[in-house]
Every structure is written in C-alpha cells, then in structure tokens.
Image (spheres, rainbow, N blue to C red):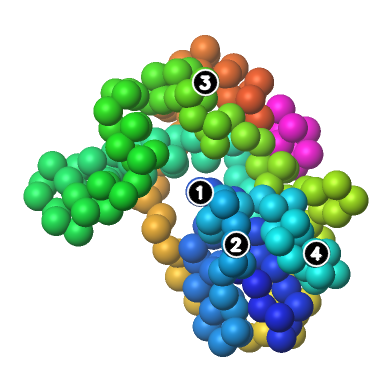
Amino acid sequence: MIVSDSARVLFVHVQKTGGLTVQDLLRHALPDAVPVQGLGGGRHARLGAALKVRPELRDYFVFGFVRNPWARMWSWYSMVQRRREAVEAGSEFMTEKLGRNQFWAKVMTDFPDFETFVLQGSDEVKRLRTPQVRYLRAPGRRADFVGKTENLEADVREVFGRLGLSLPGEIPRNNAGPPDDYRTHYTPVARERVAELFDQDVRAFGYSF
C-alpha cells in the first residue's frame, strides 16, 4: 500500500494483480510515494486498515487492481513453485527470502499440488479465501477506481491521466510469470471452490471462468 501526500493518492495493493508494477510506476512519478506506516497487513493491507491509522486518507484518491479469481489463484500457486525451483537450484537469495516468508514455506511444505493449494489451502490460509473487494472497500468508503490486471496498461494510463502524471512509453511488467492458460490446471471441484470463495469478486467485477 503506497501513499503520496503531495498528489493525495492512495494505492491499495491486492496480491497478484500487478501491484509491483503499479507501485514502481508511482514511485518513479512521485518521489514522496511511500508505504503507509503502522499497518499490520504490510503492503497488502486493506483500505479499512489504512483509514484507521490515517483517517485523512479518506479524502485522497484511492485506487487498486483486481484479477480474475481463477487466474489469480493459479498465478499465486505457480509463483511459489518458481520460488521452490530456484531454492532447489541452489539460489542463496531465494533461500534467504524463503526463510522470512511463512506463506511460501507453508505452500511448499503443506500443499504439494494445485488442487491441494485451492481446497486445503483456502481453509488454512486466510488470504487465499479473502475476496479482493474486501481490500478495496471500508465502511463508508470504497476505492475511487478499480482497474483490472487483464487491462493493466490501459487502466494504469487512465489512473495516471486522472492524476496528471506521466508514464513511460512502454509499461514494464514486474514479477510476471510465463504465459499460461490457468483453465487447464483446474478440476471441476477446484473450479467450484474458487467460484464459491470469490463470489463477491465475480459479481462485482463481472468475472467468469
């Protein structure tokens, strides 16, 4: 979660939605763009948490991004698997990061395949069952703009245009995995579980499998 007081803008970073790309662009355009301090949820804290520690942010321009829930779950799992491969290949950097990331460690240890990640993981790990809308809404306040990862470049340009900020000619994508069709990794049971968990997102943003 990034705030710029000069531009009066707050970016709510929902996991696995292209947030690192947006964060880096904001920091480049706004030198005073920094993480909101005092948040228990860190960079992926919810809007409500930010408003509790800094109530004046209610009057800022608030935006964030969401993603197709089925694609997002597969992206989450495959990201951790790439980290696992790096650790197994002897990456000291990734091994050190793994030691500080309890979520990655749990996924690697307890969820050996994607089906288990979706079915068991969503029971045991709160973030894996939390609808994205909950990050972007708080009592009496919701994000002013919600972009979609599937339309990242156009939506980023829309936000920056509203803020009067410049962007590079080509927007780089940070932390993106290789192209992959998430649909091929789902069984009917896993597909239905994601539909149940993220029904709010499906209805709010018009997503489908």
Element under disc 4: helix
Q: Reading the chain from its start, which is encountered first: label 2 or label 4?
A: 2
Q: Pointer 1: what residue?
A: 16
Residue lying at the far left of the rendered structure: 90
The answer to whether residue 208 of the structure is visible from this angle is no
Q: Left or right of 177: which side holds 167?
A: right
Of the residues tagged 2 and 3, which is closer to the observer?
A: 2
- In which quadrant will I find the C terminus? top right
Element under disc 1: loop
Categorize mark 3 by other alpha carbons within 10 Å: few (<14), some (14-19), many (20+): few
- What is the CA distance from the residue labelled 2 to the residue labelled 3? 28 Å
Q: Reading the chain from its start, which is encountered first: label 4 or label 3?
A: 4
Q: Pointer 2: what residue?
A: 38
Q: Left or right of 45: which side holds 179?
A: left
- What is the CA distance from the residue labelled 2 to the residue labelled 1? 22 Å
Q: In the image, residue 139 lies at what x, y percent?
A: 85, 47
Q: Residue at x 54, y 79 (%)?
A: 27
Of the residues tagged 3 and 1, which is closer to the observer?
A: 3
Of the residues tagged 4 and 3, which is closer to the observer?
A: 4
Element under disc 2: loop
- What is the CA distance from the residue labelled 4 to the residue labelled 3? 33 Å
Of the residues tagged 1 and 4, which is closer to the observer?
A: 4
Q: Which residue is more in the foreground, 9 or 209?
A: 9
Of the residues tagged 2 and 1, which is closer to the observer?
A: 2
Categorize mark 1 by other alpha carbons within 10 Å: few (<14), some (14-19), many (20+): many
Categorize mark 4 by other alpha carbons within 10 Å: few (<14), some (14-19), many (20+): few
Q: Mainly helix, strand or loop, the magenta region? A: helix
